[in-house]
Image: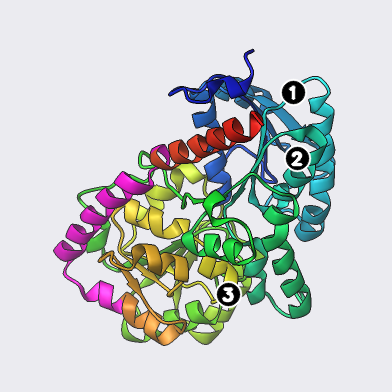
């Protein structure tokens, strides 16, 4: 194999051996950040690179490796995933063991670049930079510790959270990362403010699969009676709080026929929230589907009238480029969201997205406002929004931009 630096100045790159690190099982994607990994891997392989995936164990790994044409190195010391028990303690220990996995593999394979997903694997990637003497690119899909600001204080003391937030922002500088990709302009600003060079940061945003989340131009669900307000995702503390509860109470008071449907695994947070909601409004029409494979989520969204993003305010949520908004718009669904900084910066001029305040009263009014809109107007706005996100945020667009950036960093740093 030719040295990767031989590609400098050429229009087409040659094979590069990439160590791709993540703390989430690769397949099947469960939504959120885990969905992105598949599209990045596909793009790396499409460009002819030799991809070595380091991640927690998942079912049928051998078959998946063949299908994606990659080498898979599985972490098997304990179960990992967003729903695993003792998740936070496992996350803290994982980077050390992940680093050792890559070092063992490097005894027989010379990697040209290390690419990490999320803050957890970024720590391992940073430590590998000096050990392997290769360029490192870090991809931050969120400000992970910033989300913990909305957690109960007995679970996440504020002094601890602030220390973790400072550490997370220091990772690229601490380990001298060669390049940094972020999920939003807002998160890029935070890293730049922490001292990392803005010239080496590329906001790539967060995409969606336009083939999965395609538009149903009939929008028949919008005419359904009763209407459905939907939310999908992993249902953590920052997803469901007082804002969502008060908004549902406000909507139910004016439109008791409205159904609220939650699409995703029945987490402890969602169970507790449903109990609170029914205690406050006994006749509330609230439903949950349980776990739904990522490939089937769009079917549930198409059967809804309005999509909601009632995130509580925190540094993490302000930095998030919310996948829910993109996927709602992809299927032509109008959206109500709290005024998250990254979302309002990107979607501030999108007519199909309406921003409420960080309070349930205004959020509920925005939902009712959408339900009062003529169906034809909602369909028209949904169609236009779907076309826009398909043009700008389909994974086909984002993954090309991301891997081109990785190639550029590898070529620049690998030839020094």
The quadrant holding residue 86 is bottom right
Cα distance in 3D space between marks 1 and 3 = 41 Å
| Residue at disc 1, secondary structure | loop
- Judged from the image, the secondary structure of the residue bearing numbered disc 3 is loop
Report the residue at 62% width, 14% height from top. 2
Please name whichever residue, 131 or 163, is drawn nearer the observer in this view of the structure.
Answer: 131
Residue, disc 3: 314
Residue 56 position in % (x across, y down): 73, 40
Farthest front residue in view: 416
Q: Is residue 374 magenta?
A: yes
Q: Position of residue 89 (x, y in %)?
A: 82, 58
Ranked by sequence position, the earlier of labels 2 and 1 is 1
Query: Which image quadrant is residue 235 in?
Result: bottom right
Position of 180 compared to 92: left or right? left
- Magenta residues (range): 368-396
Q: Residue 145, relative to residue 98: is it above or below?
A: below
Above or below, 415 relative to 189: above
- Marking on residue 129: 2
Where is residue 297? Give x, y as percent: 45, 49
User: In this view of the protein, can residue 133 be seen by the observer?
Assistant: yes
Query: Which x, y percent locates residue 384?
Result: 21, 54
Q: Reading the chain from its start, which is encountered first: label 1 or label 3? A: 1
Task: State the residue in front, 278 or 412.
Answer: 412
Q: In the rendered image, which residue does mark 1 sit on?
A: 110
What is the magenta segment's predominant secondary structure? helix
Question: Which is in the foreground here, disc 3 or disc 2?
Answer: 2
């Amino acid at each position: 194999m030719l040295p990767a630096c031989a590609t400098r100045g050429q229009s087409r790159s040659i094979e590069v051996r990439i160590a791709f690190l993540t703390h989430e099982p690769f397949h099947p994607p469960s939504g959120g950040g885990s969905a992105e990994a598949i599209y990045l891997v596909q793009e790396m392989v499409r460009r002819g690179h030799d991809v070595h995936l380091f991640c927690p164990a998942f079912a049928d790994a051998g078959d998946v490796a063949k299908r994606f044409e990659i080498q898979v190195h599985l972490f098997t010391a304990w179960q990992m995933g967003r729903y695993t028990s003792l998740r936070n303690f496992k996350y803290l220990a994982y980077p050390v063991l992940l680093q050792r996995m890559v070092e063992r593999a490097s005894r027989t394979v010379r990697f040209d670049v290390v690419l990490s997903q999320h803050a957890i694997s970024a720590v391992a990637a940073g430590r590998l930079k000096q050990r392997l003497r290769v360029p490192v690119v870090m991809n931050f899909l969120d400000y992970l510790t910033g989300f913990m600001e909305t957690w109960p204080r007995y679970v996440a003391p504020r002094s601890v959270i602030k220390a973790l937030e400072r550490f997370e922002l220091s990772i690229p500088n601490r380990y001298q990362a060669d390049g940094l990709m972020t999920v939003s302009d807002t998160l890029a600003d935070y890293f730049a403010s922490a001292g990392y060079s803005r010239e080496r940061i590329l906001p790539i945003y967060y995409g969606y699969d336009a083939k999965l989340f395609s538009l149903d131009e009939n929008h028949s669900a919008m005419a359904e009676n009763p209407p459905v307000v939907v939310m999908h995702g992993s249902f953590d503390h920052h997803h469901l709080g007082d804002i969502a509860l008060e908004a549902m109470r406000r909507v139910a008071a004016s439109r008791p026929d409205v159904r609220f449907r939650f699409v995703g695994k029945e987490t402890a947070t969602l169970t507790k929230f449903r109990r609170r909601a029914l205690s406050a409004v006994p006749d509330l029409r609230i439903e949950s589907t349980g776990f739904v494979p990522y490939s089937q989520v769009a079917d549930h969204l198409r059967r809804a009238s309005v999509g909601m993003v009632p995130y509580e305010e925190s540094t993490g949520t302000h930095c998030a480029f919310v996948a829910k908004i993109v996927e709602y718009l992809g299927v032509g669904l109008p959206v109500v969201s709290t005024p998250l900084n990254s979302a309002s910066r990107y979607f501030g001029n999108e007519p199909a997205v309406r921003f409420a305040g960080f309070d349930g009263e205004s959020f509920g009014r925005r939902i009712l406002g959408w339900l009062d809109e003529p169906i034809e107007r909602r369909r028209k706005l949904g169609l236009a929004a779907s076309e826009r996100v398909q043009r700008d945020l389909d994974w086909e667009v984002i993954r090309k931009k991301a891997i081109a950036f990785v190639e550029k960093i590898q070529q620049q740093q690998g030839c020094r």
